[in-house]
Image: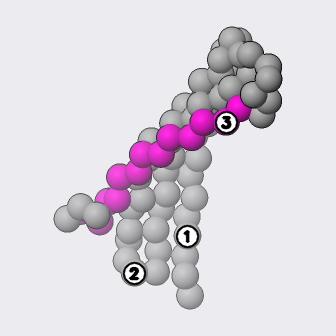
Amino acid sequence: MTPWNIQPIVKYESYDPDNDTDNNAQDVITFGFNYFFNDWTRLQFNYLYKAEEGHEVSNDEILMQLQVKF
């Protein structure tokens, strides 16, 4: 957590649905941040970079979510 109520996020995932087949694995790196308005509200913003082995597909994602607790 930073002094500006921002929490940086980095996550790495690797997925291979079939180990016997070549060039079908996928790596996903998530970059983002959480911004806390107060103890009950936060805004999450994430960019998911997806890298496929073999044939690269343009399927990156931008995600935003608002969470409110009451």
Q: Decide whether the magenta segment is chiefly helix, strand or loop.
A: strand
Q: Would residue 58 be visible to someone looking at this image?
A: no
Q: Residue 15 has which mark?
A: 3
Hey, what amino acid is under mark 3?
Tyr
Quarter of image, res 66: bottom right
Neighbour tally class for label 3: few under 14, some 14-19, many 20 plus, Cα within 10 Å: few
Between marks 2 and 3 in the image, the one whose residue lies nearer the viewer: 3
Q: Where is residue 33 in the image (x, y as percent from the top left)?
A: 41, 52
Which of the two labelled residues, at mark 1 and mark 3, occupies the earlier sequence position?
3
Q: Position of residue 52 (x, y in %)?
A: 65, 22
Neighbour tally class for label 1: few under 14, some 14-19, many 20 plus, Cα within 10 Å: few
Which range of residues does the magenta coloring cover?
4-16
Please, is residue 15 above or below residue 57 in the view? Answer: below
Hey, what amino acid is under mark 1?
Gln
Q: Give the residue number, with chain letter if any, for mark 2.
A: 39
Q: Left or right: where does residue 17 sit relative to residue 1?
A: right
Between marks 1 and 3 in the image, the one whose residue lies nearer the viewer: 3
Q: Where is residue 12 in the image (x, y as percent from the top left)?
A: 50, 40
Please, is residue 59 above or below residue 69 in the view? Answer: above
Q: Where is residue 68 in the image (x, y as percent from the top left)?
A: 55, 76
Q: Residue 67 has which mark?
A: 1
Does dot 1 land on a helix, a strand or a loop?
A: strand
Hey, what amino acid is under mark 2?
Asp
Residue at point 79% right, 30% down?
A: 18
Q: Left or right: where does residue 2 sit relative to residue 10?
A: left
Residue at point 55% right, 70% down?
A: 67
Marks 1/2: CA distance? 11 Å
Q: Left or right: where does residue 62 sit relative to residue 36?
A: right
